[in-house]
Image (tube, helix red, strand yellow):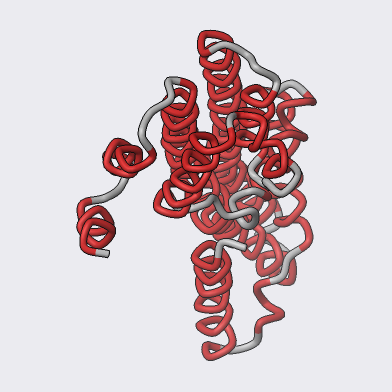
Amino acid sequence: MDIATLIGLIGAIGTIVMAIVIGGSAGMFINVPSIIIVFGGTLMVTMMRSSMSDFIGAVGVAGRSFGNPLEKPETLIEKFVEYAELVRKDGMIALEAKVSEEKNEYLKRGLEMLVDGKDKAYVQTQLSKDTEIMVIRHERGADVWSSIGDFGPAMGMIGTLVGLVQMLANMSDPKSIGPAMAVALLTTLYGAFLANIIAFPIQQKLKQRMVDETLNNELILTALNFMQDGGNPRVLSDKLSIYLDPATRAKMANA
C-alpha cells in the first residue's frame, strides 16, 4: 500500500468534511440531482471518449497507485549483487531456485529467460518491449483520469446552468428558488471536488509511477545483461548506482 496516496486522499476529504461540519449542517451539501449531473455525466462522457477496455482498464491501473509499491532501486541492487555472485559461482542454472521466490513479474521473466539460456539480444528485445507496453498502459490510464478531471468541472458548469434556468423559470414560486440554487452551486462544488481531489491526483500518481517503474525496469535489464556478459559482482553495484539519487548513492558507498 502506498501510504502517501492513502494519507493524501483521506486528508483532503477529511479537511473538506471538517470545514463543512464546523460551518453547519452537512446535509445541505448533499443534492441528488447535482450528484447525477456531475458524477454520472462525467463518467458517461469519459466513456464516450474512450474505448470500453481503456475505460475499465483505467480503474484497474488506478488501483496500482494505491497498492503494490515498487521495490526501491537500492533493494534491487542488493538483490542483483547476490544473484551475480550466485551465477559466477554456480552458473545461470543456479537462478532457477530464485525464480519461484521472485514477486517482481518483470524481473521474474528476465530470470526465467536467463535460466532457459536465451541470448542477450533476445532478453533485451523482449524486456524492452515489455517496458514499452507498460508505458502505453499507464499513459492510457492517465489519459482517462485526465479526461475525468477535465469533464468534471465542465459538467459542474452545465449543472449550474440547469439550476439557474430552473430558478429563473420559477421566480414566482419562492419555494422552488432554494432547491434550484442548490443545484446551481453544488454541481460546481462537486465538479471541482471530482477533478482536484480524485481525478488529477490519480493521473499524476500514475505518471509518477510510470517513470519509477521504467527506471526500475532499466536497472533490471542492465543487471541481467551484466550477468550474461559474466561481469564481476563487485563491479555491479557501482554500475547500477547511477539509478540511485545522490543521497542514497552516498549512503550505499559508505556502507
The residue lying toward the viewer, choosing from 26 and 242, is 242
Residue 235, image x, y percentages: 30, 38
Question: Does the image show residue 41?
Answer: no
**The residue positioned farthest toward the front in the image shown:** 89
Residue 229, image x, y percentages: 43, 20
Does 139 sit left or right of 27 as displayed?
left
Image quadrant occupied by the N terminus? bottom right
Question: Does the image show residue 218?
Answer: yes
Relative to 40, is 90 above or below?
above
Give the residue drawn at x 52%, y 88%.
Answer: 23
The residue lying toward the viewer, choosing from 150 and 13, is 13
Image quadrant occupied by the C terminus? bottom left
Total marks drawn?
0
Does 238 sit left or right of 54 as displayed?
left
The residue lying toward the viewer, choosing from 183 and 74, is 74
The residue lying toward the viewer, choosing from 65 and 37, is 65
Residue 128, image x, y percentages: 52, 18
Relative to 137, is 207 above or below?
below
Residue 217, image x, y percentages: 49, 33
Give the residue drawn at x 38%, y 28%.
Answer: 231
User: Which of the 4 image quadrants contains residue 167?
Assistant: bottom right
Give the residue drawn at x 69%, y 70%.
Answer: 174
Give the residue drawn at x 73%, y 65%.
Answer: 31
